Amino acid sequence: MNAKEIIQAGKAILGIEFGSTRIKAVLIDLENKPIAQGSHEWENQLVDGLWTYSLEAIWTGVQDCYADLRKNVQADYGCEIEALGAIGISAMMHGYMAFNAKNELLVPFRTWRNTNTGKAAAELSALFNYNIPLRWSISHLYQCILDGDAHVKEITFQTTLAGYIHWMLTGEKVLGVGDASGMMPVDPKTGNYDAVMQQKFTELVAPYGFNWTLKEVFPKVLSAGENAGCLTEEGAKLLDVSGHLKAGVPMCPPEGDAGTGMTATNAVKQRTGNVSAGTSSFSMIVLEKELSKPNEMIDMVTTPDGSLVAMVHCNNCTSDLNAWVGLFKQYQELLGVPVDMNEVFGKLYNNALTGDADCGGLVSYNYFSGEPVAGLVEGRPLFVRSANDHFNLANFMRAHLYGSVAVLKLGNDVLFKEENVQVDRITGHGGLFKTKGVGQRVLAAALNSPISVMETAGEGGAYGMALLAGYLVNNPQKLTLPDYLDQVVFAGVEGEEITPTAEDVAGFNAYMENYKACLAVEQAAVTAKK
């Protein structure tokens, strides 16, 4: 069947992902190829000192995204979406969404971006002998307890953004194991929350007298391929306000953006890895064995089918870079020159590659928010140079490109140099790689590793989520997820690989020496409280 026939037959698969700045929907066919897309731009808000998205923004956003998908399907194929083969929901991991017995949100959604949980994360890390990051859901919960927040005693359910959307669409309080591993540690042997740590937490908070336990309020954990319910009548109306979409669509376990990134880049097998680089960035290396000891730079999560993953998560990536490109756009507009943003990015990025390998001494800190891997609870975007540095446009842009992945390098140096982790292939995806070859070359230099980018890399997490939904309904041979991706989805797809040059690696290492030496300047900027 062609794409139109697949859509009319109700066999197309839908993946939706809630990213930091965009909600995206991707429709795929029976050969796992994207056939339609929809999107909605949105931004988080700083309310009472905490980063959040309102419930209204969540629902108007996904409805507008789906409406955009419908419009594009009608324009391209002249037909309506009446039914679907399967749906998958993914979103930014971690954060805090807590509900009472009336299913009311008790406090505004607290996103992964918040760094107010330092005390809780430190105490839990010591208690569990396991690195518990600031953004994890259990850190948010315990911080609320430490702060004496009155709402905690009313909690009957706590979940992530993906878990919340899935619950509203299906009535099922479940979560994919990858997303669940960002709520609290998961035991790879059981594929469930670590029972020993759950018990330790129960004992820790016993003096507060809550009438709930983590086992009662956290969502049920499911692995990729397991049934996670079906789209209800109410859910269909929530998603498609036009009323065309019928209920009953099978839905796969909701996942986090880390798991969808791994899936979209065929990086769920051991000794593979991927780097997602957009508003935030993170690398995921699927391990052969556990690390020798906990490290606060490394988060331990899982693939959507439960394999252990070492994750380096950076709160900041391309926001500052994009802001500077926006400045050049304004200059071009002042000159009265028509602006094509793809051309602006392309010219500036490619010109950066003509600069000095060490950026001529220039250093950029892209910290719109705090950066725990670098030890910064708050951040200030900062550009640093001395009078003797080689200051020109190429070095300026190269320094910002380097700065977008510098923190990622700090964390991965621990994995590769201290833990001797072995990896056969690293794949990049996300906005940083849209300008062909540039972000890829920069990342290769940073990690001193070949970096592959697939044609589907630009599709991102929504595409990965659609693949996970397809794995639920189009896997008659019951293949494992790594085998399904290898043999069914990505068979014969190699991607384009860039190997780092010795000069680029040496240049990036020299840049990092300046970067680490000037972190005190960044700290001083934070302390100054501008």
Image: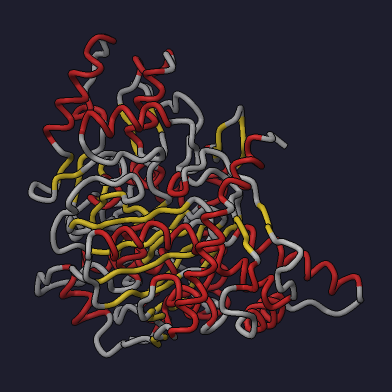
The percent position of residue 389, horizontal first and vertical second, equals: 70, 69
Q: Quadrant of residue 89?
A: bottom left
- Left or right of 477: which side holds 311? right
Residue at screen point 24% across, 86% down: 491
Residue at screen point 43% across, 31% down: 117
Vertical order, 210 against 350 (above or below):
above
Query: What is the residue that sits farthest to the right in this orientation?
Result: 335
Q: Nearer the viewer, residue 394 or 91?
A: 394
Query: What is the residue that sits farthest to the bottom in this orientation?
Result: 492
Query: What is the residue that sits farthest to the front in this orientation?
Result: 388
Q: Which quarter of the rendered picture does the C terminus lie within?
A: top right
Report the coloring of the rendering.
secondary structure
Vertical order, 354 against 96 (above or below):
below
The percent position of residue 447, horizontal first and vertical second, equals: 39, 71
Residue 385 shows in this picture = yes
Residue at screen point 45% across, 77% down: 505
Residue 242 shows in this picture = no
The percent position of residue 525, horizontal first and vertical second, equals: 66, 42
Q: Quadrant of residue 365?
A: bottom right
The percent position of residue 304, horizontal first and vertical second, equals: 24, 58
Q: Quadrant of residue 319?
A: bottom right
Q: Nearer the viewer, residue 301 or 357?
A: 357
Q: How many discs mark residues in the rendered view? A: 0
Q: Which quarter of the rendered picture does the N terminus lie within?
A: bottom left
